[in-house]
Amino acid sequence: MAFKDLLMVLTTYPDPTPVAELAQGVDFAAAIGAKISAVACEVEFRIPGSVVGNLLNVPALAAAESRKSSTNALALLTTFQQAAEKREVFHERRSETCLISEVADVLVEHARLRDLTIVPVGEGDYVDVGDWYVEQIVFGSGRPTLITPKPASHRGALTLNTAVVAWDFSRPAARAIADAIPILAMAKRVYVVTVTGDKAINTRRSGAELAKHLAIHGVEVTLDTTNAAGRSIGDTLDSYVASREADLLVMGAYGHSRIRDFILGGATKSMLARPPLPIFLSH
């Protein structure tokens, strides 16, 4: 099934999603001919009344932070609309008002009604700020997630020339490949890489069988391996995608307690804190 209905989540608090990262989502929708909706949560802060709180003027501070979030939401959605109109992409803008503790649930509800959710990740803010809702989108939406990096860390506009699939014969990897087939079919080159020298891969099947399956869907792949050689899987994949000048990495998401731990059961925090390229995740 082709991706026809995309969602992009926009952060309004404490810092807004950078405009350059917002544009990547619109570019991606244009590249695959999909509709894209952007949702921004206007965060409310409700402070219980107390003598100490009133003395410190906490309600006024909370109101100021709420206004900051609302201002960011309006600016982001306006910029999104302008970018979509410029690229002539069918689009929709959505604004929600909720408590900061409700943001994750609201975004997951939206994500469940879309084919794919795009999460722009600014340098360093994924682990520090973003993981409180991104993890729930990845594991709670039941839909694939595309994490897009800070543009300066990639090569500019998102393209689909070369895709790399991280394959270890696991259930999450199989789910990711199945979900990503519509995108893989659009790529000019697809490498299916298995990291060796790290963990035992128990299977009676071969990579050639996966290649045969993907070929039925019109996806021709090159099978490859890369040795971890004492490195983490995250660092190994980082080096591999760089060597292939990849535009997209497709990976299975493992359900560990923290998002920085779930990639293939051992990728490092830096892979998602500073993703080297767009990462397509499925659980």
Image: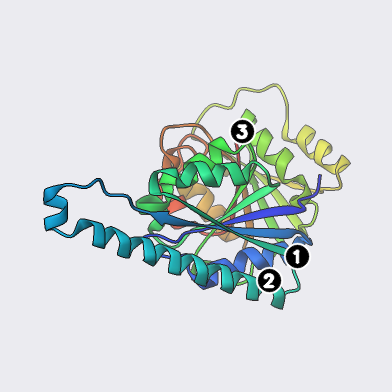
Q: Is residue 138 above or below residue 32?
A: above
192 on left or right of 251: right
10 on left or right of 180: left
Q: Which element carries disc 1, helix, strand or loop?
A: loop
Amino acid, disc 1: Phe
Q: How many marks?
A: 3
Q: Quadrant of the C terminus?
A: top right
Residue depicted at x 59% and y 39%: 141
165 on left or right of 134: right
The reply to whether residue 155 is visible in this rendering is no
Identify the mark nearer the N-term, 1 or 2.
Answer: 2
Question: Which residue, given by chain and number where applicable, does mark 3 sit on?
Answer: 172
User: Residue 131: where, in percent of width, then height?
Assistant: 42, 47
Mark 3: few, some, or many residues within 10 Å (few <14, many ≥20)? many
Question: Which residue, given by chain and number where applicable, does mark 2 sit on?
Answer: 84
Residue depicted at x 68% and y 71%: 84
Dividing the picture into quarters, in which one does residue 223 lie?
A: top right
Q: Which element carries disc 2, helix, strand or loop?
A: helix
User: Marks 1 and 3, how far apart in space?
Assistant: 31 Å
Between 98 and 270, which is closer to the camera in this rendering?
A: 98
Colour scheme: rainbow
Amino acid, disc 2: Ala
User: Residue 160: where, in percent of width, then height?
Assistant: 71, 61
User: Marks 3 and 2, how far apart in space?
Assistant: 33 Å
Badge 1 vs badge 2, beta-carbon distance below 8 Å:
yes
Q: Nearer the viewer, mark 1 or mark 3?
A: 1
Question: Which residue, given by chain and number where applicable, does mark 1 sit on?
Answer: 90
Between 269 and 77, which is closer to the camera in this rendering?
A: 77
User: Residue 153: where, in percent of width, then height?
Assistant: 49, 67
Identify the mark nearer the N-term, 3 or 2.
Answer: 2
Between 272 and 142, which is closer to the camera in this rendering?
A: 142
Q: Nearer the viewer, mark 3 or mark 2?
A: 2
